[in-house]
């Protein structure tokens, strides 16, 4: 016997079965944990700056370190545990990007190094890089046409 539900009945069932989310607590956790991630990034940046790196080299070294840390935490299955509590707070751009790439690669590692791990590693990175490069090219053309100086 199959039971048909209309939209109102389905909505009532959904509200009954879905747990209430403590919105303010979730927002607070996202803010605090996202802030901790950014504070760690700032500390890493300060570390490289104290070592005498230039501004450009400090930025590059900080980015590489944060991507590495995001990937490492993903490999150790710690990033997902943090995200479970932090929600959107773990989508801080650089570590969230590393998590997205590494987790998609880990999901398909059983399919082999080339077709599994290698191919899926760029399943997420590919579109991000394409749109990022495209947006920077469009920005450069607009800046050029307006007679601006990019430096």
Image: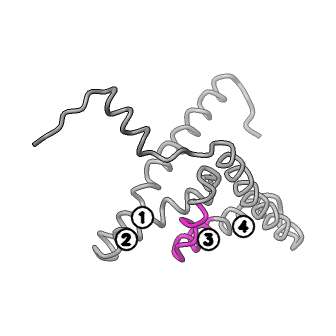
| The one of 123 and 134 positioned closer to us in this rendering | 123
The residue wearing badge 2 is 117
Image x and y of residue 16, in percent = 42, 41
Does label 2 or label 4 sit earlier along the sequence?
A: 4
Q: Which residues are magenta?
A: 67-83
Contact between marks 2 and 4 (CB within 8 A): the answer is no
Please identify the quadrant where the C terminus is shown.
Answer: top right
Give above or below for 35 relative to 1.
below
Taking the magenta stretch, the answer to whether it contains residue 66 is no
The residue wearing badge 4 is 61
Magenta: main secondary structure:
helix
Direction left: furthest residue: 1
- Determine the secondary structure under disc 4: helix
Left/right placement of residue 39 relative to residue 30 reads: right
Taking the magenta stretch, the answer to whether it contains residue 68 is yes
- Determine the secondary structure under disc 3: helix
The residue wearing badge 3 is 68
The residue wearing badge 1 is 121
Q: Residue at x 87, y 73 (%)?
A: 51
């Amino acid at each position: 016997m199959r039971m048909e539900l209309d939209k109102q009945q389905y909505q009532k069932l959904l509200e009954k079965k879905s747990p209430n989310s403590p919105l303010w607590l979730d927002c607070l956790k996202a803010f605090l944990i996202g802030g901790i991630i950014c504070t760690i990034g700032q500390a890493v940046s300060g570390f490289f700056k104290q070592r005498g790196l230039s501004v450009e080299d400090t930025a590059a070294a900080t980015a590489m370190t944060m991507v590495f840390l995001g990937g490492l935490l993903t490999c150790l299955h710690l990033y997902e545990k943090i995200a479970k509590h932090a929600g959107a707070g773990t989508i801080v751009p650089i570590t969230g990007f590393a998590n997205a790439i590494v987790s998609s690669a880990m999901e398909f590692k059983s399919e082999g190094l080339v077709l599994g791990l290698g191919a899926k590693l760029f399943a997420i990175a590919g579109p991000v890089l394409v749109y990022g490069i495209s947006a920077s090219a469009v920005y450069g053309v607009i800046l050029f046409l307006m007679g601006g100086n990019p430096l």
